[in-house]
Amino acid sequence: QLQLVESGGGLVQPGGSLRLSCAASGFTLDYYAIGWFRQAPGKEREGVSCVSSNGNNTNYADSVKGRFTISRDNAKNTVYLQMNSLKPEDTAIYYCARRIFSQCSLTDVPAYDYWGQGTQVTVSS
C-alpha cells in the first residue's frame, strides 16, 4: 500500500526549531519530487518547499526562505524539512506529497498525487 507518513511536529516556542520527516512506503522515492505544504485554520493551503528526485533542485516559499531547509535521503526513502527560527505564523498542519514528475514545483498542485495525513506544528510561547 502506497503511503506517505509525516512525523516530527509539535509545540515549539518562537525562535525554536523542528525537523519534520516524510517517510514513504509502498514505492521508491527515487523517481519523484516531493513537496511540503501547510494549511493554517481559515487559510488556504500553501506550498512551503519542494525537492527534485535527485535532491539537486529545491524551491521555497518566500515566507520560509533562509529559515527552512528541505533534504532527502533516498536510501531511507525519507524527505526532511528542517525548520529554524520558527514564528507563530508558521503554525499549521504540514503535509508532504509526491509529485508525479522528477522536478519540483510548488504551484502545480494537481501534479501531486499522494499526500500524507499531516503533522501539526504549533509555534507559541
Image: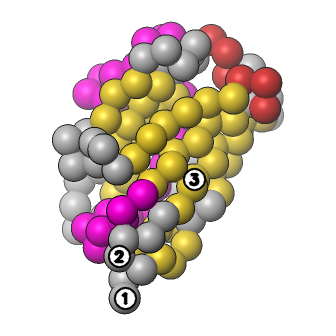
> Which residue shows up at 34% across the image and 22% down it?
105
Residue placed under numbered mark 3 in the picture = 20
Pointer 3 or 2: first along the chain: 2
Where the C terminus falls, by quadrant?
bottom left
**Residue 52 in the image, given as x and y percentages of width and height:** 49, 18
Tag in front: 3 or 1: 1
Residue placed under numbered mark 2 in the picture = 14
What type is the residue that disc 2 sits on?
Pro
> Which residue shows up at 44% across the image and 70% down it?
16
Give above or below for 94 relative to 68: below
Give the structural element (helix, strand or loop) at label 1: loop
Q: Which mark is residue 125?
A: 1
CA gap, disc 3 to disc 2? 17 Å
- Say which quarter of the image contains residue 37: top left
Tag in front: 3 or 2: 2
**Residue 44 in the image, given as x and y percentages of width and height:** 23, 53
The reply to whether the magenta stretch includes residue 28 is: no
38 left or right of 6 in image:
left
**Residue 116 in the image, given as x and y percentages of width and height:** 58, 46
Where the N terminus falls, by quadrant?
top right
Pointer 3 or 1: first along the chain: 3
